[in-house]
Amino acid sequence: MNRTVLITGCSSGIGKETALFFQEKGWNVAATMRSPEKEKSLGKLENVKTFKLDIFDNDSIHAAVQGSLSYFGNVDVLVNSAGSGFMGPFEAASKGKVAQQFGTNVFGNFNVPREVIPHFKENNNGTIINISSVITSADFPCYSLDATTKHAMEGFSCSLSYELRKNNIKVKVVLPTGAHGQSHGASKGFADFDESPGYLDYMKKVRTKSDDVVEKTGSRSFMVAKVIFKAATADKLKARSPAKNSPKQLLFMRKIFR
């Protein structure tokens, strides 16, 4: 019997690449997204079923999880990849933008594991994989909101891994550079310079250097998908899995903004 993975945020970026990678490896894939009717390719693949899931809507989460269980008979792994990014000085971020960032990257990503954990406990088995970022180990200007939410997901994952270990449930966190992941794709947000014009020249400088970081250290989505698959299939309890980041790369990423 094929194993089944449920993945959030499959409309693009890391989520979609992860769905494709698991499918190629012979897994059943419950590919979830807010608007599955717009997805034209994933649903046509063998052993892939798309489901509507909004991480802010508990009813849609429940329906997607139960639909996955009904369709595939089981869920073995949850990949929590839905998220958004924000680049800009903290001063230029409105209270609404701060709330949105934490709502999506932290509170929203709490909701899906809450629905899946009882199923994993019933089976006395399962794996939860969350997405953080290497930004938790490297210092970046103008990523204060991103860094805070990624630290939160890393801390959440590592603590939860101890809480659920007695139930044979593994909790792991993958740390991509993020340059080619969701926080630098279609879901990337930028500060409104008009709200804080004093940062305009500085932001131009940071954006230029960020492009350099993308070229030299970026984790492409398909590379992150490989790391996620490895984390999902490894028996080891190791919680953190960096994606394409050596100590030298981290030093470069810190140095380039000095």
Image: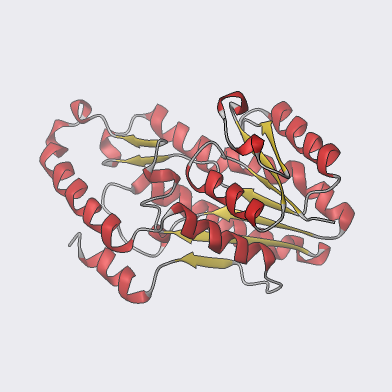
Q: Is residue 211 above or below residue 31?
A: below
Q: Residue 85: percent from the left, percent from the top?
A: 40, 41
* Residue drawn 54% across the image and 61% down it: 226
Q: Residue 43: percent from the left, percent from the top?
A: 65, 35
Instruction: Please tell me how many numbered marks the rendered image carries.
Output: 0
Position of the C terminus by quadrant:
bottom left
Left or right, residue 71 beside residue 160: right
Q: Is residue 98 above or below residue 73?
A: above
* Residue drawn 71% across the image and 33% down it: 61
Residue 240 appears in which quarter of the rendering?
A: bottom right
Q: Is residue 190 above or below residue 146?
A: above
Residue 234 appears in which quarter of the rendering?
A: bottom right
Residue 109 appears in which quarter of the rendering?
A: top right
Q: How is the image coloured?
A: secondary structure
Q: Residue 254: percent from the left, percent from the top?
A: 26, 65
Left or right, residue 208 beside residue 120: left
* Residue drawn 79% across the image and 34% down it: 67
Left or right, residue 105 beside residue 169: left
Residue situated in front as seen by the camera: 197 or 81: 81
Left or right, residue 21 beside residue 140: right
Residue closest to the far right: 122
Position of the N terminus by quadrant:
bottom right
Q: Residue 166: percent from the left, percent from the top?
A: 81, 66
Residue situated in front as seen by the camera: 45 or 92: 45
